[in-house]
Amino acid sequence: MSEEGEEKRKKMSVGIFCSCPTNIKGAIESMLEYGYHFIVTQLAHPNYTREVQSKVPRAIGRTDRVLKSSEWSRLLVGQLSPNIDVDSEVDHIREHSTDLMNQELGFASHLGVPAVWITLTKPDNVQFARVLNDKLGSGFSYSVWVNIPMVHPSRFSPIVDVEYDTWDWWNDFRTYCNYDKRVGVVLDLCDVKHAIPTAELNRWIGEPVKAIVIPTSFFLANQHGKPVLSRLHQDIIKKFISVDVQYIIKNDTEGDLTLYVRYLNFLGKKLYVQDTMSDFVQGCEDFLQNPLQPLTEHLETNIYEIFEKDQVKYDTYQSAIYKAVEAFPKEGEVEPVVMVVGAGRGPLVQAVLNVAYTLNRKVNVYAVEKNPYAINTLVDRVNNEWDNRVTLICQDMRSYEPPEKADILVSELLGSFGDNELSPECLDGAQRFLKKSGISIPISYTSYLAPLQSLKIYNEIRNNRPADKTLQFCYETPYVVHLANYYQIAPPQELFTFTHPNWSEMINNQRYKKLRFRCEQACVLTGFAGFFDTVLYKDITLSIHPETHTPDMVSWFPIVFPLSEPVHLQAGGMIDICFWRVESCDKVWYEWCLQSPIKTGIMNPGGRSYFIKKH
Amino acid sequence: MSEEGEEKRKKMSVGIFCSCPTNIKGAIESMLEYGYHFIVTQLAHPNYTREVQSKVPRAIGRTDRVLKSSEWSRLLVGQLSPNIDVDSEVDHIREHSTDLMNQELGFASHLGVPAVWITLTKPDNVQFARVLNDKLGSGFSYSVWVNIPMVHPSRFSPIVDVEYDTWDWWNDFRTYCNYDKRVGVVLDLCDVKHAIPTAELNRWIGEPVKAIVIPTSFFLANQHGKPVLSRLHQDIIKKFISVDVQYIIKNDTEGDLTLYVRYLNFLGKKLYVQDTMSDFVQGCEDFLQNPLQPLTEHLETNIYEIFEKDQVKYDTYQSAIYKAVEAFPKEGEVEPVVMVVGAGRGPLVQAVLNVAYTLNRKVNVYAVEKNPYAINTLVDRVNNEWDNRVTLICQDMRSYEPPEKADILVSELLGSFGDNELSPECLDGAQRFLKKSGISIPISYTSYLAPLQSLKIYNEIRNNRPADKTLQFCYETPYVVHLANYYQIAPPQELFTFTHPNWSEMINNQRYKKLRFRCEQACVLTGFAGFFDTVLYKDITLSIHPETHTPDMVSWFPIVFPLSEPVHLQAGGMIDICFWRVESCDKVWYEWCLQSPIKTGIMNPGGRSYFIKKH
């Protein structure tokens, strides 16, 4: 692997359990020396029996002065005392536990630790959630790490009556905590004998998993006697690498502690898949972008530059243009007229000229572009690169009156959802100057929807509302997102298709469709992911549909249509969604609503929050 | 200077004018090689005569593809064509100029340059401002650099009738642009013969000055023949170093261009004053902090840690305690009782013990602290450092009932405005356990106000409103700020004084005062800066009043009380402000309003936006 490649591998952050070291500063120093990044430890020392309601000055735990505040805030995760049982059915235990928990949470806040660790050991944790939620509401700044097993032992026990799914425990707990983004989950890795089903693993990838706990007893010895993980465990860790979890070693055997960190670092390097896409997207995982409004706002240099970098996309376009020009009859001196509409800075014009050169045919090329600043570039290219072989038109394709009609209309007006940048409306306008025998590249495109669990996106929307927008507005807007921390609840289904040219008497680009998805296992619906594919010409296609994605094409991320509240789904339940594409004289928009498992209000009525302007 | 010191010197960013280089990429590359960070150049090439309203595709300027978008966005400031005259009285010139300006601003946006450069050459620029303001409103992302002379030549000309103050031009222009934070000013350095008066220079320090233009003809040759600036010019640059301006070389002579950058870098190192304060504050210039609420919220470890770092403050306290204990009669076996109220993690307790040790006297020390997590630290210190010589009390000083009364009450409850963290209310409560003969350290404290021009703070408040607050709320709140980009319009005046102990029958901590300030020169009032000083004991004092600031003390920044709109002031005009400290059963707050030059609504009535909770 090249040096550059090495730099780009995912950094593994590894912590370790240190229950109650006598000397915490010493313990931290040696763990840092071993290569660990943080320790998980109790803050309140178990040797102190504490009466909370007391005016006599009492110690709670270690004195804060043993570490610098910058050490408390970077190197420690503070575990609540394990004897705290706020969900006890015995009143005085519950009450005393509540006092202790409040005190320890306050102490954690005083110390400024980055995260507090709590462990769920039974299904009902409503008191636990209440005490915690109360603190979260009063501005506490730490994260909460909720620890549970990835797979509950009861699932494989022949003697128990009830099988627990710990995802249910987690789901109840974070629901009580109102999906607060500071509350994350820490999973104990399952053992090899009791492997987690793939669907459940995928569901965990859609949760805010902060860390995976790995007992040292799970490591095998390789031929050199060094600890390594089994293939099964490697496969699980590989899944989590895309969502940036941390790892915590639980030392339940004898052995050299440096070896586990070293092995996990090696694993990070080995498992991180490096391709064009992962290079391109690094750092923008789950980042919400507003879709472009290319009809009303001129694109800028940096956007054109990014578009033009997608070699796969333009190569595919060039193949389509090649086939179309090749198919054009060669008789006489007739040159095919190719018009590139929305030419931008000219990548498709270049593709047409490449085809003409390769086929050794004369082609009459027009470039239509409304952005005067892109025209500025095209003027330069026509004069200096293209030998004046291209006719430039600085007009909107919907109003341009050409001197001749085109045989081939080439455009790249598609958004992440296919039609969402008004390709249908633009091409319907532009086909005025297409011959009746002429063709459009693309010929057609189709949008797809899939139900989505992404609490990450739900929280991004909720927590980053601009001061001049309402929350309703923010939830009624689709976002373009490189999905990482998500679970796709069911396979995508086809939504709307548009075909060009469209010679119907009355063109209608409004659409309505109802889709039904089946939910395989309990999960949380937070919205729908949208994709598209397109037929450029004959068998030449482009796709961002997860199952048919054009390899290495990076131009489009999925689009997400949110719901304003998470909806709990049962295994085997149905999701019914109604989806509309609506048009008025000056804009186009989408509306959507759920019919099952619950009915929701129709989102974005009249395009009140999100719409694409036509002018 | 040590290596560490070198790292901390201010980085000088230096640009250079390149009017119309034939090859812009080449020009940039050589300027970067000379050591410059950016160039100022026209974007539209003067060789193109442009008809703006044309459907024929036309070039505007250079093609964007000559540079990468990351180069356009970092290395260039785009100058508008100098023949643009939107404020012409000739209709067709004005109209054509407006078209050209709109086109060039659009082109700048297309290229993604970080700043657009416009030059004001006359007093009335309202059309200029309108065209620009229109673009600013439509989401353009660049900054606007408004270029004017620091001192207008007319000021020194014997033959002109009108003397222009270019600050007026700037002030009008940015007022039309609604004080938009993207609009900054670039000043042509005045020449040595026509030096700028100090008061005017100070006023510029309170403006968003982005850059200073220095013609190469201003440089003198030193003994080695290298270019250097005169003492006068150095003094001007020294002033601007605190507000992070950039420098632009205008090459109007022959000479080696590398020498000017090298000299300016040398100057940055030489002129940057490095002291405890500047080390401490670096990076938090003009950053708005909300005042603490120490009575209702427990302070956290990192806050205690920062407080405890201020050696000057605790040394001064220790001197005061020393003098007070020393003055205590030595007869008999009576030990002075010293109570530290609000002991935190114990720095003042340590100071008392130091004094006892130095004087070789027994002192009966109590530490009263309501924060149980600070008590946790104190318990440890009492056992391990203080040999059980301190009595710990975990209670609010306002309700504590002590077994004996104190001779000396030591506290550090002062905020940036003296009384604003409720020191008066706390000490009035605590004096119950002070002997009638006892003393308080501090004995008294006084707040001060000064009128302030800081558009920076005005914009920080306006642009960073949290989604759950109204703008009114944000303007009715005082902020703790390390002032950098500001102009203090007049010297501070005394506001409120509190003295302890206060044995009055009826203690009244409400206050009212009216202050009158004289405004030396035209400027813009955006709020008031607050300071305090305190007498700890006899001649031992602490102060953050600008004229008497305790050297190297870093614990307190000034407090700022904003106004909701900037108020234009005339030279010689008066500023009248009314200021109240008001109290109810559960809170204390301030209200303030202007009476001159205009009357404003009373800010923060009833403490609706800002108050300090008592419980």
Image: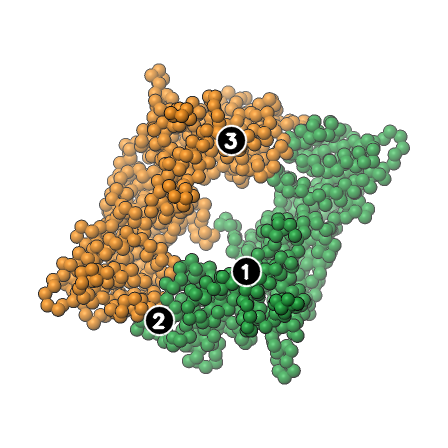
Chain colours: A orange, B green
Q: At x 61% / y 37%, what residue is drawn? A: A68
User: Please, is residue A184 above or below residue A325 in the view?
Assistant: above
Q: In the image, residue B233 lies at what x, y percent?
A: 64, 67
Q: Secondary structure at mark 2?
A: loop
Front residue (pair B585, A267)? A267
The amino acid sitting under disc 1 is Ser
Task: Inspect the image, locate mark 3, and give the three-letter code of the amino acid beneath it.
Answer: Tyr
Secondary structure under tag 3 reads: helix
Spot occupied by residue B386 in the image (x, y as percentages of width and height): 73, 30
Q: Which residue is mark 1?
A: B13
Q: Nearer the viewer, residue A613 or A267?
A: A267
Alpha-carbon neighbours of circle 1 within 10 Å: few (<14), some, or many (≥20)? some
Mark 3, mark 2: which one is toward the viewer?
3
- Residue A427: quarter of image: bottom left
Query: In terms of sequence position, does the residue under pointer 2 or pointer 1 come before the other?
Result: 1
Q: CA distance from mark 3 to mark 2?
A: 63 Å
Could you say where residue A314 lies in the image, as x and y percent from the top left? 27, 55
Nearer the observer: mark 2 or 1; the answer is 1
Q: Is residue A188 visible?
A: yes
- Residue at horizontal 53 percent and vertical 28 percent from the top: A41
User: Which residue appears at 47% of the width and 68% of the height?
Assistant: B41
Q: Is residue B21 above or below residue B514?
A: below
User: What is the tally of numbered marks visible in this picture?
Assistant: 3
Q: Which residue is mark 3?
A: A34
Residues packed near mark 2 inside 10 Å, few (<14), some (14 to 19) or many (20 plus): many
Mark 1 secondary-structure assignment: loop
The image quadrant of residue A516 is: top left
Do the CB atoms of the residues marked 1 and 3 lie less than 8 Å apart? no
Q: Chain of mark 2?
A: B
